Image: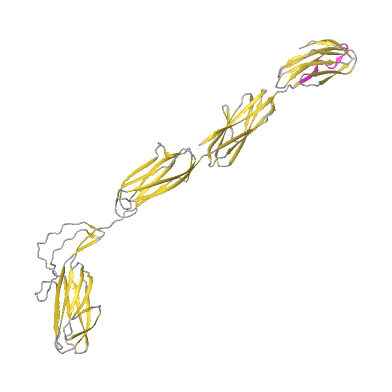
């Protein structure tokens, strides 16, 4: 913005000529005789102060000082031909020159026409007013000139006397730079976040205009359910003064108390009333895990039992760092996990990593139960920000009394008249005790009973002996009976033993062959 303060000066210049003679006149703004110089305003001379040093900006100096009147500013030149014919058009010129380095304004040029001159035209539009022609220039730059060419006709033979005057303003100008600071606020926040993780945000305020802006402050009011990590519902940053083009950045960590969509609005203001705002949206999600475990409901002791464990990510976000643990139950041996599983103390552990939403992973583990009863097997899955889930599989482990019957003879072949002993062994290879174990042995007529012994007493009935039932034969235990016979006839002889238990329901038969010879 510029402010102009000026004063008007008037200069009058006359030139006289005849049809047979010409003249040229030049005049500057120096004081002229009263008859020809007509000041529009009178300025008393004053002592000229020494100008003070002023600051200069983009628009120029912001202070100005000038003393009036000013000399040697405008020169006015008028040029007539030396001779002009009567009643024939001719041209003459008026030239105005700015002798100074400053711009002058409102330059008004007036030509006073004699009675024997008829105006025809001019190169610059003129305003005619009786015997006057007037031209106006809004401004004339320093050291610049403008020329007006006037065409007219001399109507008599008398001398032509054309006079011209000029008025102008010499302004004193002071400049002020107009600035327009502008606030711009930007905010970055993740579009998605996991419930238990901190949510980082960044706020940046900038002055994108011109000129400094003061008292800049940012206020971020958090939506319900969201706070700073130290529990505040509002964040306030003081950015102070921002120069043109300057920016400042601030950051904070937030947390959410539940899943959902959080719309976050931040506003920046200045002490001069400038304002800008920005809004972000963050969706907070939470991973959810589910687990199942299946295995045999009924299983025989000593046989491997395999369990299948399935972990599923059911939430609306990936479940990172998922770990699956299966507790090794009591009464098992031979732990065999599937690929990726490792035995760690009393657990089998699988590192499942990050599981995308709506995906599953499956593993297996095999145990060999060594005791009858209920085998309870628990698996647990947990992930970062996902609650732990468990699944239990129960198996009824059944023991079996697997009794093995063996019969051998101590001497074979046997000489007639000599003896051989049959050793009868019952071995419980199962996992539980066998009850009411009963042994019955029989021989052919070629043999003669001598004696018997064993874990129970026997009763002779013809060519057989029936031993009393053994009440219990523990798992992995043995029971032994012996029968001594004499060879009385040669031949291929068969010694037969039958065993029955409460668990079998039907007998197990075993035969031992013996050769008799003479």
> Relative to 40, is 491 on the left or the right?
right
Q: Is residue 290 left or right of residue 212?
A: right
Residue 290: percent from left, percent from top: 58, 36
Percent of width and height locating residue 503: 76, 21
The magenta span reads 404-417
> As displayed, is residue 368 above or below residue 182?
above
Q: Residue lying at the far front in this picture: please name it.
A: 130
Q: Give the camera-side residue of 381 and 4.
A: 4
Quarter of the image for residue 175 reads: bottom left
Q: Please determine whether, in this image, residue 371 is positioned above or below residue 133.
A: above
User: Which quarter of the figure has residue 20?
Assistant: bottom left
Residue 91 lies within the magenta run: no
Q: Which quadrant would the N terminus be assigned to in this image?
A: bottom left
- Counting from the top left corner in percent of width and height, residue 473 is at 73, 16
- Quadrant of the image for the C terminus? top right
In the drawing, does residue 2 fall left or right of residue 262?
left
Which sits in the foreground, 63 or 509?
A: 63
**Residue located 40% across and 45% down the image:** 202
* Residue 407 is one of the magenta-drawn residues: yes
The colour scheme is secondary structure
Q: Is residue 107 visible?
A: yes
Count numbered badges in the picture.
Answer: 0
Q: Residue at x 23, y 70 (%)?
A: 138
Tell me which corner region of the image, top left, top right, bottom left or bottom right, holds residue 170. Answer: bottom left
Reply above or below: 167 against 215: below
Q: Position of residue 276 (x, y in %)?
A: 37, 50
Q: Is residue 301 visible?
A: no
């Amino acid at each position: 913005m510029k402010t102009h303060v000026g004063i008007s000066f008037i200069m009058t210049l006359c030139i006289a000529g005849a049809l047979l003679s010409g003249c040229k006149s030049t005049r500057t703004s120096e004081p002229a005789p009263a008859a020809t110089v007509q000041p529009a305003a009178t300025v008393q001379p004053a002592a000229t102060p020494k100008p003070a040093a002023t600051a200069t900006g983009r628009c120029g100096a912001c202070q100005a000082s000038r003393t009036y009147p000013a000399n040697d500013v405008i020169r006015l030149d008028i040029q007539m031909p030396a001779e002009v014919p009567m009643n024939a058009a001719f041209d003459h010129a008026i030239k105005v020159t700015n002798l100074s380095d400053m711009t002058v304004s409102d330059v008004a040029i007036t030509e006073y026409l004699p009675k024997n001159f008829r105006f025809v035209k001019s190169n610059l539009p003129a305003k005619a007013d009786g015997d006057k022609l007037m031209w106006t220039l809004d401004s004339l730059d320093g050291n610049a000139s403008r020329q007006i060419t006037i065409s007219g006709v001399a109507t008599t033979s008398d001398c032509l006397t054309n006079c011209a005057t000029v008025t102008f303003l010499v302004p004193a100008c002071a400049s002020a730079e107009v600035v327009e600071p502008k606030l711009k606020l930007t905010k970055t926040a993740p579009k998605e976040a996991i419930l238990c993780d901190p949510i980082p945000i960044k706020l940046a305020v900038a002055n994108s205009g011109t000129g400094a802006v003061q008292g800049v402050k940012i206020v971020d009011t958090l939506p319900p359910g969201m706070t700073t990590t130290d529990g505040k519902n509002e964040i306030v940053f003081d950015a102070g003064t921002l120069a043109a083009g300057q920016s400042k950045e601030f950051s904070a960590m937030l947390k959410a108390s539940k899943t959902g969509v959080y719309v976050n609005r931040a506003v920046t203001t200045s002490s001069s009333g400038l304002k800008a705002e920005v809004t972000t949206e963050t969706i907070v999600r939470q991973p959810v895990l589910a687990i199942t475990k299946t295995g045999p409901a009924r299983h025989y002791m000593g046989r491997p039992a395999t369990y299948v464990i399935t972990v599923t990510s059911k939430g609306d976000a990936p479940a990172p760092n998922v770990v699956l643990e299966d507790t090794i139950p009591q009464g098992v041996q031979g732990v065999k996990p599937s690929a990726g599983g490792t035995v760690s103390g009393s657990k089998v552990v699988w590192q499942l990593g990050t599981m995308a939403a709506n995906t599953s992973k499956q593993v297996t583990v095999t145990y060999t139960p060594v005791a009858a009863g209920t085998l309870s097997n628990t698996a647990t899955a947990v992930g970062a920000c996902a609650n732990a889930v468990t699944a239990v599989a129960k198996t009824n482990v059944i023991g079996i009394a697997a009794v093995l019957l063996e019969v051998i003879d101590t001497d074979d072949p046997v000489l007639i008249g000599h003896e051989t002993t049959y050793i009868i062994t019952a071995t419980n290879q199962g996992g539980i005790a066998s009850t009411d174990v009963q042994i019955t042995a029989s021989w052919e007529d070629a043999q003669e009973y001598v004696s018997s012994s064993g874990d129970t007493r026997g009763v002779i009935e013809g060519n057989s002996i029936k031993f009393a039932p053994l009440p219990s034969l523990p798992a992995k235990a043995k029971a032994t009976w012996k029968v001594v016979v004499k060879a009385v006839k040669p031949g291929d002889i068969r010694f037969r033993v039958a065993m029955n238990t409460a668990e079998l329901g039907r007998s197990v038969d075993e035969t031992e062959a013996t050769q008799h010879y003479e």
